[in-house]
Image (tube, rainbow, N blue to C red):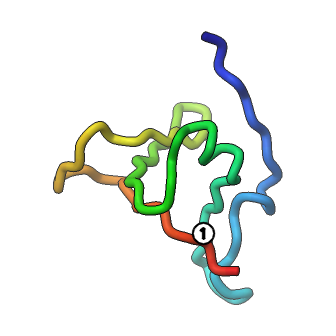
Amino acid sequence: MALKKHVYDYEEIFKKEKPDSKNVNMVIPPAILAAQGWKVGDRLKFDIGDKGTIIITKPDEEKETDQNVVVITQPDE
């Protein structure tokens, strides 16, 4: 099965919490969530690939020792 590549602009994905904040939230587009079968409440693991790509996977089971794992939440509108 060939992998499908999705390309988005930075501004479409990363949103600052506040204009003067250094923190940003990552917004996963609805089409990606649907294609992966991910939903609000799922736990996802984030890693950085060797070329700076963001690798997102859904762990098969939850482990307290998992690092880089976050829970999908509903974005603030």
- The percent position of residue 66, horizontal first and vertical second, equals 25, 50
**Classed neighbour count for the residue bearing mark 1: other residues with Cα under 10 Å, few (<14), some (14–19), many (≥20):** few
Image spot of residue 19 (x, y percent):
73, 87
- Is residue 59 shown left or right of residue 22? left
Please say if 9 is above or below 74: above
Foreground of the two, 28 or 67: 28
- Residue at 52 percent across and 41 percent down: it is 37
- Residue visible at 72% across and 29% down in the picture: 5
Left or right of 11 on screen, residue 33: left
User: Disc 1 designates what residue?
Assistant: 25
In the image, is residue 35 above or below residue 5? below
Amino acid residing under circle 1: Asn
Q: Tell me the quarter of the picture where residue 12 sits.
A: bottom right
Side of 19 relative to 54 (left or right): right
Tally of numbered tags? 1
48 or 76: nearer the viewer:
76
Disc 1 is placed on an element classified as strand
State whether residue 30 is above or below residue 37. below
- Name the spot of residue 61 as percent of width and height, x first: 24, 42
Quarter of the figure that contains the N terminus: top right
- Image point 50% across, 42% down: which residue? 56
Q: State which quadrant residue 18 falls in.
A: bottom right
Name of the residue lying farthest toward the top: 1
Looking at the image, which residue is at 64% across and 55% down?
28
